Every structure is written in structure tokens, then in C-alpha cells.
Amino acid sequence: MLLQYLLENLTNVKVNGDTNREINKIEYDSKKITNGDVFVAINGYKEDGKNYIKEAIEKGAIAVVCEEKIEKTDNITYIQVEDARIALAVMASAYYGNPARKLKIIGVTGTKGKTTTAYMIRDIMLAAGKKIGMIGTVCNTYGAVKEESSRTSPESLELHALLARMVEAEMEYVVMEVSSHALELNRVYGIKFIVGVFTNLSEDHLDFHENMENYLNAKAKLFKMSDFAIVNGDDIYAPRLMKMIETKKATYGLDNAVDLTATDVRINPSYVEFKMYVNKMLETIRINIPGRFTVYNALAAIGVCSLFGAQMDSILAALAALRVPGRNEVMDLNKTFTVIIDYAHTPASLEAILSSAKKYTKGRVICVFGCGGNRDKEKRAMMGEIAGRLADFTVITSDNPRNENPNQIIAEIESGMKQTRGLYKAIENRRQAIKFAMRIAWKSDVIIIAGKGHETYQEVENNKKLHFDDREVVRKLAEEMPDKNIQ
């Protein structure tokens, strides 16, 4: 492919060198450069891409895209752009044949509920006979293919490569979790979403966005790229967001929604059931994921899929069979107590799942959780206070400590816990913490193991990942326990 073809849709470009030359591929990681590649020098969280231009050239790059002017050397083509991330997105799209234009893409954004809503949309559309791929936190799927996911929304280069594979697999639709990072860092730049969904907004990622105003503005970018918007009308930020959305829009919810709502909501330890009118017929919907928030996610998914002609029989069948890894996942252990694995790692998500569990649990609610290292520290005490206030007993443990001392993180969580009268125990070893919670559980108790959900690792010092799956640990411990959990 000629370099000039990749630059056709870029604006305000200054070129120093020959663009009428064949290139091999595009890379933004200098370590992956081979002969004939184009190196795009983007800024990462910790590193500035321009510091790796020399290395990229030494490895064989024949062209460099950068935001700063660079003096020409040797036979290298230099392309100066205003925004290297936008340039990467535009060039990646061209390199892979503009795959996004060949797909109907549904975007789901929000602090909580993105993954479950995406799964719901995918499964309903599949039940309706649609060919749909999914991009998200847990995995990427299309047809019979399931690929591991490294982040919620891929970098633009990997994203367009993935979309191209979906086109090749003859997908017609794609449902995609769209993170605030992806929107702010232009990973999804240039993509047209046929529908954008807003689930909710609560405190998270403030180490990146700094404040809630910036966080909201990042989320709102999705709807400038969407033909239609579906918004949770009950969310506290909904009124402000609705004023920012200029495209066609609809709302869903249980309190303030005017377009799509549910009635007679019944929440049980292992499922939720509700009723809603469809074509003037009152339908009963059951989903094996307990919690009021499950109703919100379902309403969003039903609203989206209805736009594409999904009928109620497909909706009922898909939601009844739904299973989302690590999202309010009820473990089948054949014990007198219940264990639920959930990804809740923010104050709002922890409060939501604990509040929900308190309403349907006949025994005690036991919470096991920690907080990630090298992330927003302010939420640690907040989550400690929430657990202390809502759970009957809490086991504070390690999550993904990364480069922080796990005991220091636990101490910061404890500072919030001590503001309450909540009973707790701190056990740094996560497996031992889970074991302790299961050993003290009585009949009808519910154990909520929060924070890691679908993750199969613990991230420790120096970016090292150790295998650790809450679900595997729970199953193994359950097998080792005597039939009667009597203390």
C-alpha cells in the first residue's frame, strides 16, 4: 500500500519526503517496528512517542508521523500532524479498508453496566438471527471466534484490525463498549455509531479525567458520533447529557423515563423478574442476574434491539439464557449460602450491588473486596465506608496492587470502614480472604466477592500478572469444604 493513500483523509499535514512509496504496516509501538513500517509517535500514559523515533528508524521504519517538526535525515519521510492519535485512527482505518463503514456499530458507554448491556444486545440480536460481533472488557467475539481482550476499547490500530476481521467474517452489526479513555484519546475517532447508549455516570477514572465535568464531557463525545441516542433517564447526569445531545434520542428507566420502562420489578437471590408493555401486550421478562441495575441494562438492550426489528420471543429467550462472566455472576456451588462474583470496583458499583443484595438476602451479606493500586486513591476510603455501612461483615483484601504496597491500600480502605460500625477483618492474601468468608458463611448468607469479576490474574509489581481467578478459587474451596458449613 502506498503511503500517500494513508494520508488522503488527514488535514493540516506537513510532509517532508516522498509519500509515493510502498509501506509494510503501521505501528505506534517502536518495539514492533520492522522494515518498511510507518511509525506513529503518539503520547502514552508514561512515555512520549517522539522519544522512540530514533529506535523506530533503526529498526526499519521508512516514515514517521509526529506532532512536532523534525529535521529530515536519510531516506525517511516525516509527516507532521496536529494530533498523532487522530492521525493513527485515520491511517488505521484506511490501511484496513475502512471496515467501520461496512458495519452497523452500536456503542455503549457509562461507568457501570457497559459489559452486561453489550452482552444482552449481542445475545438478543443473535437470537433474532442477526450476525453481530462484540467488542468489550471481557472478550471480543464474532461468529465462532472468541478473542481475549486487553482493555475495554482497543487502541485505534487494533480496533480497525478487529473490525476488518469482523467484516471478513461477514458480520453485519457490532456492539462495542466505549470507554471514556477511548473517547478522550480518540481511539474511536471517525467511527459512526448507528446507536449510542448511556448507562450511568458515577465517580471513576478521576486519576485520568481529574473531575466529573471532564468525565461527563468525555462520555458525551459518543453521541456526537451517533445517529441515535438511548439514555438512562434516571441517572443524575441525564438532564445535563440530554441537553448536550443534538441527535435523535430516547430514554429508559424506572422513575423518570418517558419512552421505555418496566413495572412489578421482583428481585431474588438468583434472578430478577419484571414486566413491560410491548406492542400493547404486557410481557414478563426474567433474567438470571439479580439486582435492580439488571433491569436498567435490560431496558437499554431491549430499546436498542427493537430498533433493529428484534421480536419479543428473541428478547425473552436471550435474556432468560444470559450469562455474563464476572458480572453479578451467581456461582453454582450446591451450598446453603450463595456466592456472587462481580466486577464492582467503584464506590457507586459497590454500593449498588450491596444495596441490592441487602434487599433480597434472608441471611447476612458478606463482602470481600480490595482496591487496585496506581489508580484513583480517593475512592478507597469511600468504598470502605460503603462496605461498612451496607455489608453485615466485610473482608478487606488485595485486588491488583500493581506497584503499590497492598497493605497500604488496605489501610486506606480501613480508614473509611472505621467511620462506620461495620464488622470487618483484613486479610491481604486474596485466596485466604475468600476462604475465610466462605468458612464463616451460614445458611442463607450471600457472599459478594467484588472488584475483579472476569479477570483471571492479579497484577503485581513491575507489570507482572499472576494467574488468579475468583471463580476458580471459589469452586476449589467449595469442593474442599464439608457438606455442612457449620462453624
Image (cartoon, rainbow, N blue to C red):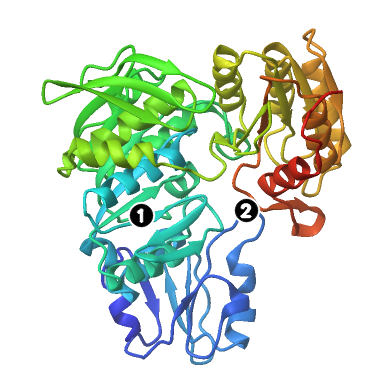
Residue that carries the numbered disc 1 in the rendered image? 189
Q: CA distance from mark 1 to mark 2?
A: 19 Å
Q: Residues within 10 Å of mark 2 (few under 14, many from 20)?
A: few
Q: Nearer the viewer, residue 352 or 280?
A: 280
| Horizontal side, residue 183 vs residue 258: left or right | right
Give x and y (percent) for residue 295: 38, 25
Tell me what residue is drawn at x 48 percent, y 60 percent.
155
Report if residue 473 is visible in the image. yes
**Residue at 28% over, 19% down:** 275
Picture quarter with the N terminus: bottom left
Mark 1 secondary-structure assignment: loop
Q: Are marks 1 and 2 in contact (CB under 8 Å)?
A: no
- Looking at the image, residue 481 sits to the left or right of residue 35; the answer is right
Instruction: Say what secondary structure mark 2 lies in.
Output: loop
Q: Residues within 10 Å of mark 1 (few under 14, many from 20)?
A: many
Query: Who comes first in sequence, dot 1 or dot 2?
Result: 2
- Considering only vertical position in the picture, is 108 above or below 472? above
Q: Residue furthest front?
A: 483
Q: Position of residue 337 (x, y in %)?
A: 68, 26
Question: Who is closer to the viewer here, 322 or 223?
Answer: 322
Q: Give, as a three-letter code, the residue at label 1.
A: Tyr
Say which mark, if any, is on residue 45.
Answer: 2
How far across and down, in percent of the image, does residue 73 sit?
54, 87
Q: Looking at numbered disc 2 in the image, what kind of residue is underneath it?
A: Tyr
The quarter of the displayed image where residue 386 is located: top right
| Quarter of the image where the C terminus is located | top right
